[in-house]
């Protein structure tokens, strides 16, 4: 449909467009709707689900194909899933003729709606799905190290889903993978501990694993079912990136068959947006996974990925803390009058002990110092030139210097591997660790090479045919640098930059203050991560315990996670909480329609919430809005919701919630997790109260938020909704002055300014340089770091004000006490600066300057 699959082999499989195969797997059928809601494509086997209708579906309305009720249920499922590619589910749908039933998933992507039809799940599958996520979460939650976690997950997934082999597969830093845990049928050969080459999972396949967390191949020998009609010239292909039925590359199917695998399922492990590993499930006979089980598995994958991330971050923090402790010991007694180069040089032996290595070197300001195993002096210039090009400002490593440099005489035996750490933000200076050759063996699951087969059209590269253990003798390379080595290297880089390179002009008192601040930030981060994981666990368990169906569980769980995510993002945005109206508008926006702008009325003066109150109220608001949409006034077009608030004399905020025009309200007969969350979180977490009156004409609620959890939102620091909408590129073509004494922060802020349209950005590290730049070539606007070490940018601000040049302050402090007197009206952005907050602040400053200029002209 979209490309010629017959030309695919291992010479081009890394470029195979597997997201647009034009075919699906035969255990289901597909309908694709256009933006107008009409059928644009159908799979060739659709009649097997609808009956032999002997008709042309393309161009028909969905209701005419599947029936009015199913069409209505699908529309509701898509609406509940929200925007984007998140799928909605309709179970046991009775299709048009009433004689055929199907489980249906629906998702939107790139303007199209994709409907996937599969055989209805059995009652047993539905029952298992309701308890699958809870069981897995409860059993793995207490495991705090990778080895025990992976072993348990492999056993549990095999027990719950019944595959012959379940492997936990972890990617290494070089892209290859290693089986770190396995549960299998005793008759199967073990792959535990074996490696798989990076070519086994091409780059485009890894991207799809991040988009689609559960991937099922029911039969590795399946015959693809095409989508019809064929794509017309110039028409965009049908992108099946998020479709569960998407057909599979013939190379991958051949690869599975060569392994003796008839069916497979993969569960993605995604950490920080990157594919960290896979849970790979293999079966010796064809095997399908029903939609309820697949949905439950995907929810577990999301929780499991969070758990893996938490363990990894905890291990990295422990390694970093241990390294910092050893670094403290290394530099104890350093004379602050000594040059930095001398300090590093005299302690090079101690630095080399931080990471398992055979020697170390220091390249600083064009000079080379070394200890232990190191290349010859003559080889250093070429080596540093190569390292500078490869590393830049990042840590860089290799176990094969011989190949990287191309010098067989210098590298490959005594010096074979290198780890380079940049230690300066202003020059190409490096701390380098070396390793000697370490002849060793790697166990591969089959020989990691491509086989050539003679075909009618010539030689063709084929997947590996054997997966028997194959041992490779590794020569002229060092042992690889591990993730633990890289974590220690990053701690060294941060320490050297933040402490050692600043000790010449820092007092002992200042160094102690910096260390306390780092410990405080680390403690706060640890506290927040633990709280978030505990809250996610509670939401998963409580939602499952009160769910009536898989669909109910999915929608409730995902909705609560979205509300939690919004509150979490706001709490880290540098504003210590958020504004009440903004939170309400964000949630209400999902239920407003352009034809009914007054469907939800929000009224109240600006009120700020602390970070704690913001997170609690975000979850409460989501529950109430969801209930209104499911059962209350927002469940019908004629319904209306009015939300208003006022601040009383004692400082408390009294919020009123009034629904009207909806179905007649009947008081609930039981209390679920949502009801308890609404009524108890405000009282338990904030010391406030919630009163709910289930009047027949509509729900009425009175919510009290105590004054201790409110904060003042100054009118002059408010950024209007109109300003925010106009602030996407407020600096188009402008010349901007940036005053910032920290070079790394200056680089980041300069990139943000250019992304907002700035044509030229002049950077000054202190006030004297800034005043000179203003005098020589006045900018059109400016960003001033308020605190510049021992001084402030106040003098530069006064000069910009005198010249009527708009500017904003940037500061890392969380209150307004540091703003100098007379500058209270200047917009402030908090560090770390985000693109959105900077755009809004710059728009406000430029708009204020423009209004002042017009006012001055009218006076003249």
Image (cartoon, helix red, strand yellow):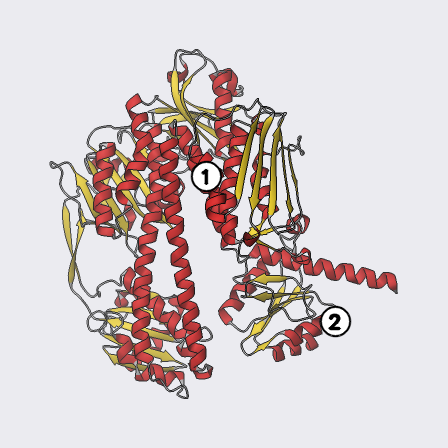
Crowd rating for badge 1 (residues with CA inside 10 Å; few <14, some 14–19, many 20+): some
The x, y position of residue 85, in whole percent, is 47, 36
Q: Position of residue 97 (x, y in %)?
A: 44, 11
Foreground pick, 649 / 62: 649
The quadrant holding residue 833 is bottom right
The residue depicted at 28 percent of the width and 69 percent of the height is 418
- Asked if residue 795 lies left or right of residue 59, the reply is right
Quickly name the residue at label 1.
677
| Secondary structure beneath label 1 | helix
> Residue at image x 68%, y 74%?
774
Kindly identify the residue that appears in the image at 57 percent across and 35 percent down: 701
Of 691 and 533, nearer the camera is 691
Q: Does any portion of residue 729 appear in the rendered image?
A: yes
| SS assignment at label 2 | loop
Please tell me whether residue 680 is drawn above or below residue 847 in the rendered image.
above
Q: Give the farthest residue toward the right.
A: 860
From the top left corner, tell me how far across and down residue 679 is, in percent: 49, 38
Q: Nearer the viewer, residue 312 or 781?
A: 312
Q: Quadrant of the C terminus?
A: bottom right
**The N terminus is located in which quarter?**
top left
The residue that mark 2 highlights is 803
Q: Which mark is residue 309?
A: none
Whether residue 823 sits left or right of residue 504 in the image: it is right
Label 2 – label 1 distance at C-alpha: 55 Å
Task: Of the two numbered discs 2 and 1 on the same chain, state the one appearing first in sequence.
Answer: 1
């Amino acid at each position: 449909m979209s490309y010629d699959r017959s030309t695919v082999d291992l010479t081009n499989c890394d470029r195979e467009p597997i997201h647009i195969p034009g075919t699906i797997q035969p255990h289901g059928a597909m309908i694709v709707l256009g933006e107008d809601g009409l059928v644009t494509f159908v799979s060739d086997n659709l009649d097997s689900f609808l009956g032999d209708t002997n008709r042309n579906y393309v161009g028909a309305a969905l209701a005419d194909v599947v029936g009015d009720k199913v069409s209505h249920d699908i529309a509701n499922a898509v609406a509940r899933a929200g925007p984007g590619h998140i799928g909605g589910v309709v179970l046991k749908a009775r299709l048009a003729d009433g004689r055929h039933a199907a489980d249906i998933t629906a998702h939107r992507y790139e303007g199209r709606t994709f409907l996937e039809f599969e055989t209805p799940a059995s009652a047993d599958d539905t029952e298992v799905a309701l308890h699958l996520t809870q069981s897995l979460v409860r059993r793995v939650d207490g495991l705090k190290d990778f080895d025990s976690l992976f072993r348990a997950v492999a056993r549990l997934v095999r027990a719950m889903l019944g595959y012959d082999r379940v492997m936990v597969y972890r990617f290494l830093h070089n892209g290859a993978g290693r089986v770190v845990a396995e549960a299998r049928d005793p008759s199967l050969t073990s792959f535990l501990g074996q490696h798989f080459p990076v070519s086994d999972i091409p780059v485009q396949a890894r991207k799809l694993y991040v988009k689609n967390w559960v991937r099922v191949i029911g039969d590795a020998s399946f015959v693809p079912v095409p989508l019809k009609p064929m794509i017309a010239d110039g028409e965009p292909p049908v992108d099946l990136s998020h479709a569960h039925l998407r057909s599979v590359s013939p190379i991958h199917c051949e690869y599975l068959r060569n392994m003796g695998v008839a069916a497979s399922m993969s569960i993605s492990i995604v950490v920080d947006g990157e594919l960290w590993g896979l849970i790979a499930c293999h079966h010796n006979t064809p095997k399908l996974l029903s939609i309820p089980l697949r949905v439950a598995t995907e929810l577990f994958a999301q929780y499991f990925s969070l758990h893996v991330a938490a363990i990894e971050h905890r291990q990295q923090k422990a390694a970093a803390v241990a390294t910092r402790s050893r670094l403290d010991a290394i530099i104890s007694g350093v004379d602050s009058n000594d040059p930095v180069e001398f300090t590093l040089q005299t302690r090079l032996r101690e630095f080399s002990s931080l990471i398992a290595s055979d020697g170390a070197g220091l390249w600083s300001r064009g000079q080379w110092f070394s200890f232990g195993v190191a290349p010859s002096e003559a080889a250093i210039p070429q080596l540093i030139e190569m390292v500078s090009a490869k590393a830049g400002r990042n840590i860089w490593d290799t176990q094969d210097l011989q190949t990287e440099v191309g010098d067989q005489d210098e590298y490959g035996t005594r010096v074979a591997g290198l780890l380079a750490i940049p230690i300066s933000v202003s020059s190409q200076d490096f701390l380098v660790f070396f390793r000697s050759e370490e002849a060793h063996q790697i166990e591969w699951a089959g020989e990691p090479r491509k086989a050539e087969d003679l075909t009618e059209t010539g030689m063709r590269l084929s997947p590996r045919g054997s997966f028997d253990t194959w041992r490779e003798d590794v020569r002229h390379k060092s042992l690889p640098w591990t993730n633990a080595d890289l974590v220690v290297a990053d701690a060294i880089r941060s320490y050297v930059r933040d402490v050692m390179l600043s000790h010449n002009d820092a007092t002992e008192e200042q160094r102690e203050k910096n260390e306390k601040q780092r410990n405080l930030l680390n403690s706060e981060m640890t506290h927040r991560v633990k709280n978030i994981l505990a809250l996610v666990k509670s939401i998963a368990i409580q939602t499952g315990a009160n769910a009536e169906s898989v669909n109910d569980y999915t929608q409730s769980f995902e909705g609560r996670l979205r509300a939690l995510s919004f509150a979490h993002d706001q709490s880290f945005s540098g504003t210590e909480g958020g504004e009440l109206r903004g939170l309400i508008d964000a949630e209400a926006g999902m239920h407003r329609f352009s034809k009914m702008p007054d469907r939800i009325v929000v009224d109240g003066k600006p009120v700020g919430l602390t970070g704690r109150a913001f997170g609690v109220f975000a979850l409460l608001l989501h529950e109430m809005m969801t209930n209104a949409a499911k059962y209350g006034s927002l469940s019908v077009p004629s319904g209306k919701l009015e939300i208003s608030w006022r601040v009383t004399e004692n400082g408390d905020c009294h919020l009123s919630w009034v629904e009207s025009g909806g179905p007649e309200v009947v008081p609930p007969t039981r209390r679920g997790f949502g009801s308890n969350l609404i009524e108890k979180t405000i009282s338990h977490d904030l010391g406030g109260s919630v009163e709910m009156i289930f009047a027949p004409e509509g729900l009425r609620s009175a919510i009290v938020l105590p004054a201790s959890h409110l904060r003042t939102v100054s009118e002059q620091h408010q950024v209007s909704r109109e300003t925010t909408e106009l602030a996407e590129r407020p600096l188009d073509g402008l010349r901007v002055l940036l005053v910032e004494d920290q070079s790394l922060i200056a680089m980041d802020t300069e990139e943000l300014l250019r992304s907002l349209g700035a044509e030229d950005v002049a950077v000054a590290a202190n006030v004297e340089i800034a005043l000179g730049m203003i005098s020589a070539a006045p900018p059109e606007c400016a960003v001033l770091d308020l605190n510049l070490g021992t001084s402030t940018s106040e003098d530069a601000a006064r000069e910009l004000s005198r010249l009527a040049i708009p500017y904003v302050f940037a500061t890392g402090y969380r209150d307004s006490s540091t703003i100098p007197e007379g500058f209270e009206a200047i917009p402030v952005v908090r560090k770390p600066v985000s693109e959105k907050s900077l755009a809004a602040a710059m728009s406000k400053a430029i708009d204020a300057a423009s209004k002042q200029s017009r006012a001055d002209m009218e006076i003249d």
